[in-house]
Image (cartoon, coloured by chain):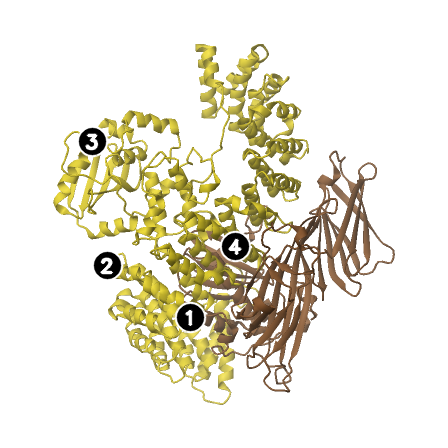
Amino acid sequence: MISQFFVLSQRGDNIVFRDYRGEVAKGSAEIFFRKVKFWKEDGQEEAPPVFNVDGVNYFHVKVVGLLFVATTRVNVSPSLVLELLQRIARVIKDYLGVLSEDSLRKNFVLVYELLDEVIDFGYVQTTSTEVLKSYVFNEPIVVDAARLQPLGPAAIFMQGTKRMPGTAVTKSVVANEPGGRKREEIFVDIIEKISVTFSSSGYILTSEIDGTIQMKSYLSGNPEIRLALNEDLSIGRGGGTIYDYRSSSGSGAVILDDCNFHESVRLDSFDMDRTLSLVPPDGEFPVMNYRMTQEFKPPFRINCLIEEAGQLKAEVIIKVRAEFPSNITANTIAVQMPLPKYTTRASFELEPGAVGQRTDFKEANKKLEWGLKKIVGGSEHTLRAKLTFSQESHANLTKEAGPVSMTFTIPMYNVSRLQVKYLQIAKKSSSYNPYRWVRYVTQANSYVARI
Amino acid sequence: MAPPAQSQRSPSPSQPSGKSEVSDLKLQLRQLAGSRAPGVDDSKRELFKKVISYMTIGIDVSSLFGEMVMCSATSDIVLKKMCYLYVGNYAKVNPDLALLTINFLQRDCRDEDPMIRGLALRSLCSLRVANLVEYLVGPLGSGLKDSNSYVRMVAVMGVLKLYHISASTCIDADFPSILKHLMLHDSDTQVVANCLSALQEIWSAEASTSEEASREREALISKPFIYYLLNRIKEFCEWAQCLVLELVTKYVPSDSSEIFDIMNLLEDRLQHANGAVVLATIRVFLQLTLSMTDVHQQVYERIKAPLLTLVSSGSPEQSYAVLSHLHLLVMRAPYVFSSDYKHFYCQYNEPSYVKRLKLEMLTAVANESNTYEIVTELCEYAANVDIPIARESIRAVGKIALQQYDVNAIVDRLLQFLEMEKDYVTAEALVLVKDLLRKYPQWSHDCIAVVGNISSKNVQEPKAKAALIWMLGEYSQDMQDAPYVLESLVENWDEEHSAEVRLHLLTAMMKCFFKRPPETQSALGAALAAGIADFHQDVHDRALFYYRILRYNVSVAERVVNPPKQAVSVFADTQSSEIKDRIFDEFNSLSVLYQKPSYMFTDKEHRGPLEFADELGNLSIGEAANNVVPTQMVEENDKDLLLTTSEKEETKGSRNNGSAYSVPYDGSSTSVFASQTQIESAVSNPTLAGHSPQASFAIDDLLGLGIPAAPAVLSPPQLKLNTKAALDPSTFQQKWRQLPVALSQEISVSPQGVAALTAPQALLRHMQSHSIHCIASGGQSPNFKFFFFAQKFEESSNYLVECVINTSSAKAQVKIKADDQNTSQDFSTLFESALSKFGTS
């Protein structure tokens, strides 16, 4: 049970504010914002998603730079409230097509309308876009999506946050297209976020894949859908420890550690032929989340060397090698490395003929940054940096710098080998043939090489 | 709805400050109010939008109330909705104007479109104006009977809103029983769910004054109703499922086959993508199996994978909430998770609050087989750019060392830290080496060699400096230049700002003096002189004490200041086991995230439906919270790891009370109460809560409390009491409210009794030996307040006592209530005799 819900902009302005129970004083949004902004005096630490000020519990999630906040005085389930906030953001996005400060401001009356139906007197009524459709009457004012960002599977993950939910398209589920009729189509995205830690000798210390099969349906009449996955897919790694890498080598089977499913998914024949059947509700939702620690081939190898090069000087060499097929291209690659605290200057040397690369030395937090627009499979790139120190380093340089971390997006590639073998839509007529989009994306979650 | 009217931010140019715009709007609204021109609805929409946007950014537009109401005569549903929104926001501050809206809202409640009926009813109930409640009853009554489920859904919440505006109107209209009927018979599950939410709130609020409401509330967790919900659980939406699961947690099955049935039924809920459903299910599983150690352990194994999946899917915020719960489980049963330690490795981009949880989990799961890898990983973090996390990583390494696995390798690592030449690393490592030496004195040789090389000038943090000084004193015979290092520290006495360091310096000087008198004597003199002149009271006192005891007899001084020490076997934990159990009982709530039981952060009235309130609430609990740590920690053997921590202590024979978890299974009370009882009984049993063991043992001896439950000797009354009486706080509270005062008197307390009452626990223990149990206590000198209860031997007849002792007047005000009034006099005699013996026997 929550007391208030509000959305704040990055500057702390109220975009929407709904008080459901009148138990929490009106100034809560300001109290909240001050607390979040100045969590620790030094500004180093982020405020946790849940905290308590004078008996009021504040919950917040960050979505596209906006703060979605709920307050309550009751000792509720934090998962429920945080999940709800996330879900409210998703419902709003389903309606508006694009979720941004601008679209929210333009459509706040519609958002109020949604909020009235989603929550009554603090209790959740429904978060289903499908159900809400029959209660909500405002037409969304669609914000021009093209102006905001280029479309395409890669760009959608570009919003900086670590776990941006995959966005099929920026199209409202209710608004009609300019042309009049809605286009019959369905999007299925297989999004994998990978975490790998390499030891200083290049050995893989830990690796994990967190995957989601995300669906967004624009099909009219709610037809049933069958989604077939790899037949040799198995779930649960019986017996051995989870990090037993040997068990997976050899056979090409995809072994998930665990997975969970959306409510609408029926698993009647899942055990037999690995097929999920569902009637997709309107809007965007995760069909299945899965987790895998099975060994996989990391898409990038990172080599890093840091050496003294004379008095008050050192040299850093970072090599990145793409170990995926050459018909695949990774984009928006960023490599980061903390340098010794007493580094005053860094001069960079890129390989000859390098295009679409930029380098930077962040003075404030002593970080080296190397950005690459794209990396083609099979290629290798090197960065050399000459560092100047303000004081003699007496300890081992490798203890003062690193680790190297990397973020990237690789469209049309997934490391787990999990596949959607086919996507079957129950036919309404012989001429009914909606568009189906099945897309794969791999993204770095935490990709780290120690030095 | 609107944020504070006087926003502190200065309005930006795009946000008008108010006045002129509002009057402008007023004018335009007036013009449109009567108009029936085509397209007028569109212009109205635009105007309404403006009004609402002003409202949102905090401009007071309440002056438009009249115009808004006038414009609301429309069939346009979007307009209606905006108008309802506006009215709901300002009705409370404009009760007179709100009356204007009643009319059109009531009319809309009879509209033929169910959407309009529902919306109007919702707005009507959201006015929150007390003197308009009479207008609500009619529409609500028909709304509850509406053929459309949307209207019924709204009406049910409307009843709850009405209850909060005027409880009596709601009860008088008999709405709760209508809701109860709907809850049992409605075909729409959201209506059922809303009834459940509403009734839980209403009956919980009523339960304190109405016997019937409290019975109804109990009935919600009766077998037929729980089964009714469980059998339909998949028809409920995911949020309502959470509600149902929360209720199931409170249900006490009669036997184990029922437990398995419920678990099998809910098994697939663990695969739900909504974390809230999964956590609620896990809570049910954990609660159901508390008394079945083996199954409980299987549950841990079963829930591991779903929890890890939830942690790694979803937004960082959601995964934090789940991770906190995983953290709780890992801390309770680390060995279950020991092979999953890699999941607790920190990722470089995680926020500190996540890293902190993970570090604690890594520390907890370390065992023989994984310590090496975990410590290696932690050492990586020690060089981390995030300094607070680097510090905590080093502390984690130290804690693992103190857990005694593979100390050898760890000591090497710690010593490497000392050589890293980073201030904060050195500081943390020094503190750890000191703790390590207290536990493993055999390592002194290796450590001292390294510590000796550290220049005290490079150590600035008080804690680290104190640790270094302690080592210098303790091992001055092995450290060549210890006396001289200490001497130089004494010379800089005035520059040392930390009293802690100065205190340590005094003691270290003394120890050094006993071992190497000729080299230390003059420096000791200087230290004592500086200490006696110190402005800090403790430093001054200690210096003076050392000075005098040295003058009295040096060998006595040595025996006092530097007696042979025993190695510390276990360092005290920071949280008492009662607190931990209580947090566990509040699984899937904020308590887990805050790592505090709910009473520490929630006001009484918001603690949730089944929490007991009133005066009992904050008496003894606060005390239990302040109790520093049970000193004896239990050596963990794998078998009983899954028992509650307090049960473990019980098996060690330190408690003679009823088992902590026997209470929930008597069928009448719930786990929330169980944990309560646990805390109470812990308080009433000071062996658990001895913060200074010597002191409490001394009192024990004084009181001769070795004899359990001695019957009264002086004037043996006929009344025999049950030595193992049990009563849960809610029943106590209920009875206290219902029963009349049978006896009220003043009893004198002996001077010895007053003297012994320095700690209330002493009295609790004393009374318990007379079979009078404490259920809550509190207060501060001179006034202490206690609630006691006792039960007649072999009968369930209870005596309840409120006893207020004023130590300055040495009087106790006693109020006794009894189920059996006839025996209250006997009980009173017994109580008085027991009390009079306090401190004298």
Within-10-Å neighbours for mark 1: few <14, some 14–19, many 20+:
some
Q: Amino acid at mark 4?
A: Val
The numbered mark at residue B211 is: 2
In x, y percent, where is residue B302? 51, 54
In x, y percent, where is residue B280? 45, 58
3 or 2: tag closer to the N-terminus: 2
What separation in Å lies between label 4 and label 2 (alpha carbons)? 39 Å
Question: Helix, strand or loop at disc 2?
Answer: helix
Q: Disc 4 designates what residue?
A: B322
The color chain A is rendered in: brown
The numbered mark at residue B62 is: 1
Q: Amino acid at mark 1?
A: Ser
- Identify the residue at the far left of this view: B822
Residue B135 in sight from this viewpoint: yes
Q: Tell which tag, 3 or 4, sits nearer the viewer.
A: 4
In x, y percent, where is residue B382? 64, 40
Q: Could you tell me which chain the residue with mark 2 belongs to?
A: B
1 or 4: tag closer to the N-terminus: 1
What separation in Å lies between label 3 and label 2 (alpha carbons)? 37 Å
Q: Could you tell me which chain the residue with mark 1 belongs to?
A: B
Between A331 and B726, the one lying in front of the other is B726
Residue A104 in sight from this viewpoint: no
Q: Could you tell me which chain the residue with mark 3 belongs to?
A: B
3 or 4: tag closer to the N-terminus: 4
